[in-house]
Image: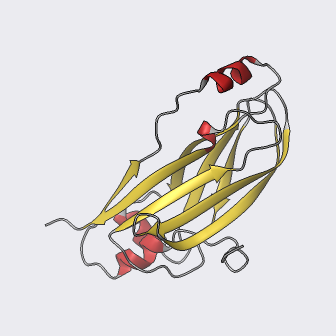
Amino acid sequence: MKRRAKMRCVWLLVLAVALVSLPGCVKINIVDRTPATVLPPMELGAAANADEHNLAVLAIDFDPPLEYEQIMASKREGITLLVAVENTGGSSEDSVTVQAELSTDDGQTVILEDENLIPVIAPGEIKIVRFKTLGDIPYRSAYQLKVRVVPVKGEARTANNQKSYDLYITQPE
């Protein structure tokens, strides 16, 4: 379970810690690296089934937004990663696990990983999962963020269960 036990509710203090040490305004760019979803023939048949099990990561956001002034104003509270998960299937799902991983070096060095549980999510419902910050993270100019909802039993379409992002921190010249 790697560092999961120690890192419960630990998240993106990266920017608060990193930005405190940088003078002036800093720009943070987030690039969605998730490949476009193309359904293989097997998944097309599953998509036609009204009772299918299907969860999807819709998007991420941050609270406060990743803007230098906002981060500096809230550095004591930290930054919360928000992950939107939708049940696009026809069945209610129980005990849905959502995972998040922050890494550097093109994903080779894991800095943080954490998971949260959605107790129940009904068909068509969107739930927001919150990952709170509590730890120190080394400053890097680039990070990789992966979020994933663990497939549930009977889920055939899993291509939409994850998203990957690159986060770049730059100073104006």
Where does the image place residue 161, in percent across and percent down from the top left?
63, 43
Q: Is residue 50 left or right of residue 169?
A: right
Q: Quadrant of the C terminus?
A: bottom left
Tell me which residue sits at (33%, 82%) in the image.
21
Q: Residue furthest left?
A: 173
Where does the image place residue 60, in percent across and percent down from the top left?
54, 49
Q: Is residue 96 left or right of residue 17?
A: right
Q: Nearer the viewer, residue 68 or 111?
A: 111
Q: Nearer the viewer, residue 57 or 122?
A: 57
Q: Is residue 63 visible?
A: no
Quarter holding residue 104: bottom left
Where does the image place residue 79, in percent across and percent down from the top left?
53, 66
Tell me which residue sits at (29%, 78%) in the image.
22
Tell me which residue sits at (18%, 65%) in the image.
172
Q: Nearer the viewer, residue 142 or 122?
A: 142
Q: Is residue 35 visible?
A: yes
Q: Quadrant of the N terminus?
A: bottom right
Q: How many marks?
A: 0
Where does the image place residue 163, in percent across and percent down from the top left?
53, 47
Q: How is the image coloured?
A: secondary structure
Q: Is 17 above or below relative to 9? A: below
Quarter holding residue 77: bottom right
Q: Is 167 above or below relative to 141? A: above
Q: Is 61 above or below relative to 17? A: above
